[in-house]
Amino acid sequence: MLASAASVTKTLNIGSFVFAVDFRHPVVLAKAAATLHLLSSGRFEFGIGTGFHPYDYNMSGITLDPASKRVERLEEALKIIKGMWTQERTNFSGKHYQVTEIEKAGELPEGERPPIMIGGGGRKMLRLAAQHADIVDIIPPWRGSWSRAYKEQTLDGIKRKINRVKTAAEDFGRDPDDIEFQVVSLRTEITDKPEPIIENLANDFGITTEDIENSEYVMIGSSSEIRNRIMRFREETGVNYFVFRLRSDQFDEYAESIVKPLTT
């Protein structure tokens, strides 16, 4: 699907959100990503993660290991993938993966590789992202933890995590300004009557309506209110990547009244 999208467009970036290493070997991912990068003339953004949802693991019969082990496996995978993008031959021997003299994933132009996007909220994932990612997605708390982690969803909570990434990047000798940041809006809806929707969400997640209104992962209101909120959030945090879950019947209105004014 990504290759098809690249073939009929000229400027649109394409990307994955996200490939989980538990379901695809890093050698396979490295080759696929390099191919997509070449087919799209450098427009592919490579999103990669650990995998996390029990539903996916139960269906496929794969063991859902503890988070620490999955992060460890992702770190090894990233070393293999980056090696296969930049080296003629890659060797790696870790706890989870071993590759010997694996050939380069593709003939990428010198100095080019797909930008890497990693999402994280915990300290280990954010530190891993600070070391390897070009785009860091500050992910929201999972559904079951909203009631005890509501402060992480606020503007201040997200800014703390961004600063944590920037500090860790400096530890790894990276320029924090080279990292872009992303957030995902779990619920975005254009409406002149937000109160009933907010109340239902609060009941569903077990938090107050005030917590929902203060969450930067929920954007419900008129098109001008949502647009202004995005602008304010971008100015306050420096985040410039946004992913929105929209109602399909609001795509055109969203594109015309929110996206277009923000990008022209």
Image (cartoon, rainbow, N blue to C red):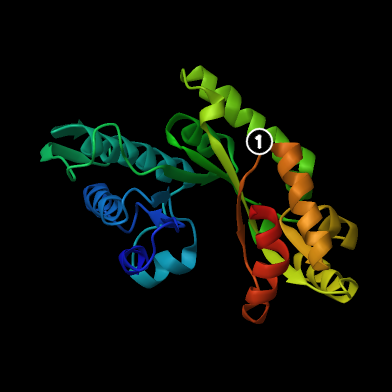
Q: Secondary structure at mark 1?
A: helix
Look at the picture and state if 235 lies above or below 27: above
Look at the picture and state if 191 lies above or below 69: below
Q: Residue furthest front?
A: 264
Q: Residue furthest bottom?
A: 249
Q: Which residue is mark 1?
A: 161
Q: Nearer the viewer, residue 199 or 104?
A: 104
Q: Quadrant of residue 3?
A: bottom left
Q: Amino acid at mark 1?
A: Lys
Quarter of the image containing the C terminus?
Answer: bottom right
Look at the picture and state if 210 lies above or below 154: below
Left or right of 240? Residue 175 is left
Q: Nearer the viewer, residue 215 or 115?
A: 115
Is residue 117 visible in the rendered image? The answer is yes
Q: Nearer the viewer, residue 122 or 226?
A: 226
Left or right of 122? Residue 199 is right
Image x and y of residue 257, in percent = 73, 67
Look at the picture and state if 2 lies above or below 250: above
Q: Nearer the viewer, residue 114 or 9?
A: 9
Left or right of 245? Residue 113 is left
Image x and y of residue 240, in percent = 62, 45
Image x and y of residue 189, in percent = 74, 71
